[in-house]
Amino acid sequence: MEAHEHQGSQLKYLTVDPDNYDPNKKYPMIVMLHGFGANMQDLAGIAPVLNPTGYVYAFPNGPEAMELGPGYVGYSWTHPERRRDPEEDAKTRTMLNSFFKEVMEQYNVQPGNAVLGGFSQGGRMAYACGLGKPALFAGVMALSAAVFDTEPLRELLSTERTQPVFIAHGDADTTVSVDQARMTRDFLEAEGYHPVYNEYPMGHEISRALLSDMTTWLQEVLPPLE
């Protein structure tokens, strides 16, 4: 696999090409949004674990930089002091929608031949940007994430509630509680979705068991290019 950094029209991003990448083939794409304080490299390591040959991967960088310590800069999808502000969320959705179009055109990915996922804050943005766009994303994945205010999300949902959703959460997560993940699952079910919901004996993290379940889900929702 080979990684490339790009400066997009609004966001920096990292792409990871599969082994023996052939630009003439139509690969499905997995887009992953990092968590609060991380960066575009943070989730790239899951690519070879999920599938090293059948997908192209895209990892955008959050637009808001913040100093987390001497010499260490992290990034957020919204202003660090306004992480749950509806206006901030709307601004970020606009940037991400532009990015999705840009990176999918770059790799000649057809609408509907991609899945959007994210970890923690990135998972919350994946809900907001992915649900309601069944023509663009075949499914949505939320890892260690939750929706804290469901009303703004309800307004974004499409009339068709058929998009597959994969939710994974640690039962010992002290950053985003498992109760919040369960409430998000219950909200989606009440709205007509049928999410796959898995809990794991872990904290705010990604485990091998989670990635195994995620790979199985992807095989059904977005089969890799053979």
Image: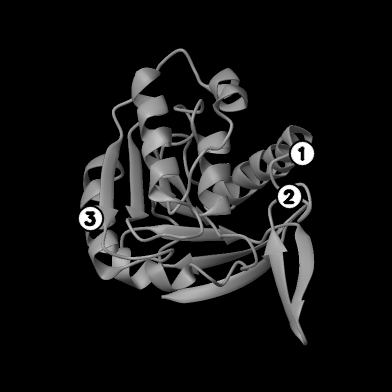
Local packing at callout 3 (Cα closer than 10 Å; few below 14, some 14-19, many 20+) is some
The x and y percentages for residue 130 are: 51, 36
Is residue 128 shown above or below 44? above
> Do the CB atoms of the residues marked 2 and 1 lie less than 8 Å apart?
yes
Quarter of the image containing the C terminus?
bottom left
Residue annotated with mark 1: 91
Q: What residue is rendered at 40% in x and 46% in y?
A: 141
Work out which residue is located at the far bottom of the displayed protein and give it: 70
Front-most of residues 8 and 155: 155
Q: What residue is rendered at 66% in x and 61% in y?
A: 61
Residue annotated with mark 2: 78
Q: What residue is rendered at 66% in x and 47% in y?
A: 99
Q: What residue is rendered at 78% in x and 65% in y?
A: 65
Mark 3 belongs to which amino acid?
Asp
Q: CA distance from mark 2 to mark 1?
A: 8 Å
| Residue 52 in sight here | no
The x and y percentages for residue 116 are: 47, 45
Q: How many marks?
A: 3
* Badge 1 element: helix
* Residue 148 appears left or right of 210: right
Display coloring: one colour
Quarter of the image containing the N terminus?
bottom left
The x and y percentages for residue 143 are: 41, 53
* Badge 2 element: loop
Mark 1 belongs to which amino acid?
Lys
Q: CA distance from mark 2 to mark 3?
A: 30 Å
Give me the disc on residue 213.
3
Work out which residue is located at the far top of the displayed protein and give it: 159
Q: Earlier in the sequence, mark 2 or mark 1?
A: 2
Query: In which quarter of the view is residue 139 placed?
Result: top left
